[in-house]
Image (cartoon, helix red, strand yellow):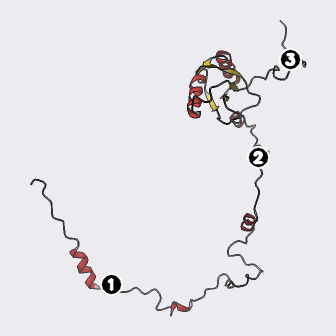
Amino acid sequence: MATRGAPPASLPAKVVSVPPNQTLYITNLPSSKIQKEDLRTALYMLFSIHGPVLDVVALKTSKMRGQAHIVYRDIQTATQALRSLDGFEFFGRPMKISYAKSKSNIVAKLDGTFKIPTSAATVEVTDLQQSIFNAPVPGATTSAAAPPGLPTKPPSGADHVMADAGTPESRGTKRPRDDGDSDEESDSDVAMEEDSDDE
């Protein structure tokens, strides 16, 4: 029995096969007839016949229109689904199914090989953000003087009395309640008369 080796180098890149993977790449899906969530649900229902589906990625962007990725837990289940559903008519169009070129993020997280992409967009920090992040900690003493026009901050831990607060004895004294108000309130608690609907 002949062993199957790598395909000849003279073949174009599209003909060279992709190694088996837990993630399937589906093309030729209807993009305008069906909503994204309905498409994901229909794909999940169809592909879960062959085994547990971990994720269904179906985007409606211009680049990903008519394409989806189905992620299985193992390669055997993905291979079984690929063999039985390749060419299956899905909403009036035959699906084209192949293995995905790379491992899905969900599979990488499960087997512990997931790495956060380094090509993420770099965040530009504005001068205002920089001044906020580099501001001194509240309550910390600084050697810099206050900007002109602003009062100086009192030293931390020092208690100062406000000029209009009066003497400490007069602060925090509760006023007595007037007795006349309590009689009026008790009159307002009279029970309501019952209305008769029998008339």
Between circles 3 and 1, the one closer to the viewer is 3
Q: Disc 2 vs disc 1: Cβ atoms closer than 8 Å?
A: no
Mark 3 → mark 2, Cα distance in angstroms: 35 Å
Q: Residue furthest left?
A: 199
Q: Are there few (<14), some (14-19), or many (20+) residues within 10 Å of tag 1?
A: few
Residue type (three-letter) at the residue carrying disc 1:
Arg
Q: Earlier in the sequence, mark 3 or mark 1?
A: 3
Q: Earlier in the sequence, mark 3 or mark 2?
A: 3
Which residue carries the number 2 mark? 120
Which residue carries the number 3 mark? 7
Between circles 2 and 1, the one closer to the viewer is 2
Which image quadrant for residue 98? top right
Residue type (three-letter) at the residue carrying disc 3:
Pro
Relative vertical location of residue 132 with respect to residue 106 in this rendering, above or below: below
Task: Quarter of the image for the C terminus: give it.
Answer: bottom left
Residue at 84% over, 13% down: 4
Relative vertical location of residue 36 with respect to residue 98 in this rendering, above or below: below
Secondary-structure class at tag 2 = loop
Which residue carries the number 1 mark? 177
